[in-house]
Image: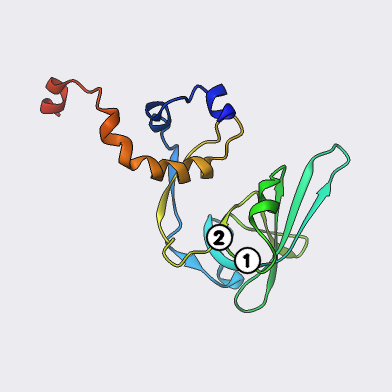
Amino acid sequence: MKKLREAGIETVRDFLSLFPRGIEDKSDMIEDFSMINIKEKQAIKCTIELLTEESTRNKKLLIKAVLTDKSGFHAEAVWWNRRMILNQFHPGDTVIIYGQAKYEYGRLSWNSADIEHFRETRREVVPVYSDVNYIPGAWIREKMSLMKGYIDEVGDDIPDEIRKKK
């Protein structure tokens, strides 16, 4: 709550006025690393085999994950200063990684890709929100879906004459 207040978000209206900066199509999910197109972002279903943390010389936190696809092939994902990944994900979890993969040092890897728990019903086109005051855009997207019930209570600021005209 403190970070939201510091960002000027104190009411439901303030929260609903955060607009997405784009959309991502996560509906076309693949399950084999061999099917990845490294020229575009894609969603891939895989399993976390190993999750580790390291501190760099300049005191940054580096999270590394070894991922396995359905055929048993391995890849790697890394995130900088994202401690929440260690709290939310564990070895054995089936996840969806969304981002642009690259081949680096002879292996497939993702740098700071989106990660979420796999849910059978979670294949969709989703809005992309910018991070606000170190609050991840993914968290904002998740909470925004909870706000749908409050939209009518917030009201509409568009004058009737403009609404009728358009």
Where in the figure is residue 132, as x and y percent of width and height?
Answer: 55, 31
Tell me the number on the disc at residue 93. Answer: 1
- Left or right of 145 on screen, residue 111: right
Where in the figure is residue 134, as x and y percent of width and height?
Answer: 61, 33
The residue lying at 66 percent from left, 69 percent from top is 92
Seen from this angle, which residue lies furthest bottom?
71
Q: Quadrant of residue 27?
A: bottom left
Q: Amino acid at mark 1?
A: Asp
Q: Amino acid at mark 2?
A: His
The residue lying at 84 percent from left, 38 percent from top is 59
Q: In this rendered view, identify the residue nearer to me: 100 or 87.
A: 87
Please tell me whether mark 1 sits on a helix, a strand or a loop. loop
- Left or right of 100 on screen, residue 56: right
Where in the figure is residue 23, as x and y percent of width and height?
Answer: 42, 46
Residue tagged by mark 2? Answer: 117
The residue lying at 45 percent from left, 37 percent from top is 21
Q: Is residue 102 above or below residue 15?
A: below
- The answer to whether the residue labelled 1 contacts the one labelled 2, judged by CB atoms less than 8 Å apart, is yes
- Left or right of 14 on screen, residue 50: right
Label 1 – label 2 distance at C-alpha: 7 Å
Q: Quadrant of residue 164?
A: top left
Looking at marks 1 and 2 on the same chain, the residue that comes earlier in the sequence is marked by 1
- Neighbourhood count class around disc 2 (C-alpha, 10 Å): few under 14, some 14–19, many 20 upward: some
Please tell me whether mark 2 sits on a helix, a strand or a loop. strand
Quadrant of the frame with the N terminus: top right
Q: Is residue 103 above or below residue 126?
A: below
